[in-house]
Image (spheres, rainbow, N blue to C red):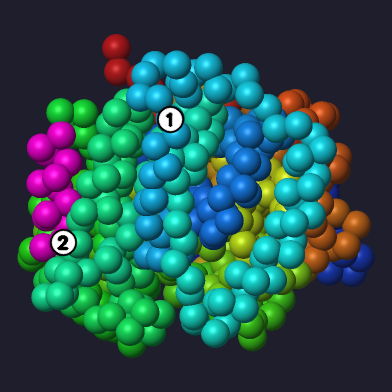
Amino acid sequence: MKSVLLLFIISLLLCLTGGFHTNFTGTTVPGVSDISVYVCADLSAVIRRVDPRFLSVTLDASLAAEEKFMFLLQSPKLKTLAKALTPAFLRFGGTRQDFMVFTPQRFHQLSSSFTAEKSCDKLLPSWLEQRLKKEWTQQQMSLMREDVQRKYKQVKFTEFTVDLLHSFTSCSGMDLIFGLNALLRTADNTWNSSNARSLLQYCESRRYMMSWELGNEPNSFEKKAGVRVDGYQLGQDFTHLRKMLSESKFYHDAGLYGPDVSQPRDHRIDILDGFLPSGAEAVNACTWHHYYVNGRDTSLEDFLDPEVLDTLTLKTNEVLEKVKLLSPGKSVWLGETSSAYGGGALGLSDTFVAGFMWLDKLGLGATLGLDVVMRQVFIGSGSYHLVNDNLDPLPDYWLSVLYKRLVGPEVLKIKAFSNVGQSKRVRLYLHCANKNSYRDGAVTLISMNLSRRPARISVPTLLSSSTVEAFVLESGEDGLYSRSVKLNREVLKMVDDETLPDLKGIRLPAAEHLQLPAYSLAFYVLTDAQAAACQTPQ
């Protein structure tokens, strides 16, 4: 008890907490006392800066298992939802990318008659959208059987898939990353690049600007295809692909990312040990994947457990240390990530409670040293999607849009203490505010409360004169299992297929404290903070 009291006193002395407090009264639990949280923040310097496309998304290659489902990318609703997440990468890949073979039909005239710009006006007829959505539900059952049995069929795709992908990303403002099949091998187990060359030639003829990947989770090749490729050979395969790109006048400077390895297990990251010496120079960033739990046996408690959330630190540091040792200065990305592997956890990964894992991953990932985090999945098979099978946005979608609008790429140093020691269930991160939305010097406090107790947050005196805009997210009528979300007590939903609602904060004057409701997620923008780190150099 004495040690807790000493920590509490030290935190007060360090932070000089005083004049700034604000008040947002959210959901409270009768008879339950607040958690008091005291914050230290350094606004004088940026500790690191992430890519402006830090929050990015994936599109699962399973959508192209039957090419007709690619038509869904022409849905006006889907285009509207994608635009709100820009700037961002859209990575097309996943397990089935390593079973996809480009099979050109040569039905396109290689002329300028078809362009992505002109196709932006092409919309999916409502009758066809409804039919495809209904059939997609049935298609997912077939895809799930393949996943369980780990028996994957070869998928032949044509120019049609590439055209729609490029059109979708071009019209929405996203940057396309296309995942190539790495399981096309020669007799001596090197990568057979002939199919990729055919695809590159087609894309170059259409002037489709995009970046590339090669293979998905190579450490699982043996399980899903009976093929073993070690890290050194994979690095040579990437070097071969980089050489192909450099020989193209159009793709000479195109991005190449990889190797998209699974997260470290039992402190083993063998693929990277071999890949980085032979392939690091070929890639613009080293990519890896992370999931917290197994979607088949997880629980609500796991999604709210700070110890589970903290495992990201261990996994990330393992990868960062390995890359720093073998390829110093190389950017590291989470090339695919969500809450639970195995397609997500139904009833959890697609509900409000998943937001705690997602927002904490964004805050912690930016702080630790990741430059891009790609959310699995925007739409596609599984239950960890941002947009459901009816193309309606889920809670994590709204959380992502708010992050895009409110949070800038500059990461600031912050430390939080509570009246029960260093806070675990109240988790805070601090960035400069998005300068497209707020004036120079504004900061955004990213906040989450994993507790059934409300939290009272006191921040340093140097912010005492700042007005606050509060964006507090709470669950809909089904509580933590809800597939709807309330922003400042108003349920969020689209106005129509081409219009998002106004995402307005509540302006709060200085008051006695900043109240973070139980089981809530929040962004607090301190508009007048005048943080030196967030000022644009003159």
Q: Which residue is mark 1?
A: 108
Above or below, 165 against 332 in this view is above
Q: The C terminus lies in which quarter of the figure?
A: top left
Q: The N terminus lies in which quarter of the figure?
A: bottom right
Give the side of residue 195 with respect to residue 309, left or right: left
Residue drawn at 37 percent across, 19 percent down: 111
Q: Nearer the viewer, residue 229 or 521?
A: 229
Residue drawn at 75 percent across, 56 percent down: 135
| Of the image marks 2 and 1, the number of the one nearer the N terminus | 1
Residue 316 is covered by the magenta coloring: no
Magenta span of residues:
236-248
Indicate the position of residue 32 as horizontal and vertical percent values. 84, 69
Overall secondary structure of the magenta stretch?
helix
Give the side of residue 159 with respect to residue 195, left or right: right
Classify mark 1: helix, strand or loop. loop
Residue 447 can be seen, yes or no: no
Q: Name which residue type carries label 1.
A: His
Q: Which residue is mark 2?
A: 237
